[in-house]
Image (cartoon, rainbow, N blue to C red):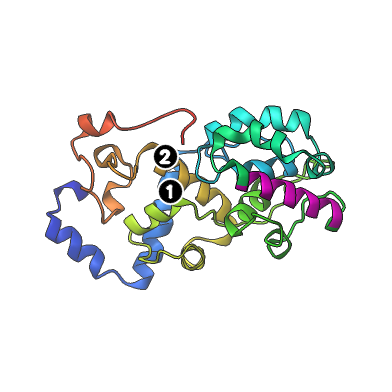
């Protein structure tokens, strides 16, 4: 069993890992997370691609829970890109103030709404290249929208798979020994070579769920982790099952 390995044995095991071994381990870890979190999904509330785009931009430096608290009011007052493009910035700032960095976020969501109205006929674009031209939209936001949005008319998913390299994702892939990179774009490309493309969107959800619930930044619940046998960072947090179980979180999480 992995828990019987000494720290030295564990270090040597992963230090000597081949490229093929890394690919196999990464995919096995993703399968374990798939079994652990069968209901993993985007935890932002939305009813259209536009709402998901706005919510994702607003989620920077705050929690999905907080964003979900303010978006009903925002979307009730400004339901379309055209409405938000013409909004009074001070009114939008007041609505989203609790999400933090509200002035910058207001500038971005009004700016991207103007771009949607003027350049894309009021529709959310469906390519990464077009998405990142919108104010306040980077690769992470674009991948969230493209991988989770559905056509408002047909209900069909956009179906553009992508990796959502947020802070949880970055922390976990480094702890897992998948990469030592810190640059999000480089991480995206490296992990994209480990996980099959068809799994990119869902693998992102699973990693983020695990980061929010078990593999915390300061004190991961190592003793309650389903990846014990596969993780080179086992022991970063408490390994006692009872103590670790107290750290596991559930429900809507930051």
In this view, the residue in front, 99 or 216, is: 99
Could you tell me if residue 1 is visible in this image?
A: no
- According to the image, label 1 marks what residue? 168
- In this picture, which residue range is highlighted in magenta? 104-118
Disc with the residue nearer the chain's start (1 vs 2): 1
Q: Position of residue 62 (x, y in %)?
A: 50, 40
- According to the image, label 2 marks what residue? 212
Could you tell me if residue 227 is visible in this image?
A: yes
- At 64% from the left and 54% from the top, the residue drawn is 136
Q: Position of residue 52 (x, y in %)?
A: 67, 42
Mark 1 → mark 2, Cα distance in angstroms:
7 Å
SS for dot 2? helix
- At 77% from the left and 30% from the top, the residue drawn is 77
Magenta stretch, overall SS: helix
* Left or right of 182, for residue 133: right
* Left or right of 122, for residue 242: left
Labelled pair 1, 2 in contact (Cβ < 8 Å): yes
90 part of magenta stretch = no
- At 69% from the left and 53% from the top, the residue drawn is 159
Other residues around mark 2 within 10 Å, as few (<14) / some (14–19) / many (≥20): many
């Amino acid at each position: 069993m992995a828990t019987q390995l000494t720290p030295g044995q564990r270090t040597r095991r992963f230090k000597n890992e081949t490229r093929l071994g890394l690919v196999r381990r990464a995919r096995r870890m993703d399968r374990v997370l798939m079994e652990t979190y069968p209901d993993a999904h985007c935890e932002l509330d939305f009813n259209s691609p536009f709402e998901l785009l706005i919510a994702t931009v607003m989620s920077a430096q705050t929690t999905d829970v907080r964003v979900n608290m303010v978006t009903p009011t925002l979307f009730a007052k400004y339901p379309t890109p055209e409405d938000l493009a013409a909004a009074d910035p001070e009114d939008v700032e007041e609505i989203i103030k609790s999400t933090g960095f509200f002035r910058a976020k207001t500038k971005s969501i009004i700016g991207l709404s103007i771009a949607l109205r003027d350049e894309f006929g009021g529709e959310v674009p469906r390519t990464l290249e077009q998405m990142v031209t919108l104010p306040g939209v980077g690769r992470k936001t674009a991948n969230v929208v493209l991988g989770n949005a559905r056509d408002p008319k047909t209900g069909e998913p956009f179906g553009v798979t992508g990796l959502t390299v947020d802070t949880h994702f970055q922390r976990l892939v480094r702890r897992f020994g998948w990469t030592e990179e810190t640059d999000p774009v480089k991480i995206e490309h490296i992990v994209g070579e480990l996980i099959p493309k068809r799994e990119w969107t869902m693998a992102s959800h699973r990693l983020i769920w695990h980061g929010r619930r078990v593999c915390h930044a300061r004190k991961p619940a190592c003793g309650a982790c389903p990846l014990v046998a596969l993780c080179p960072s086992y022991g970063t947090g408490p390994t006692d099952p009872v103590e670790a179980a107290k750290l596991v979180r559930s429900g809507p999480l930051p």
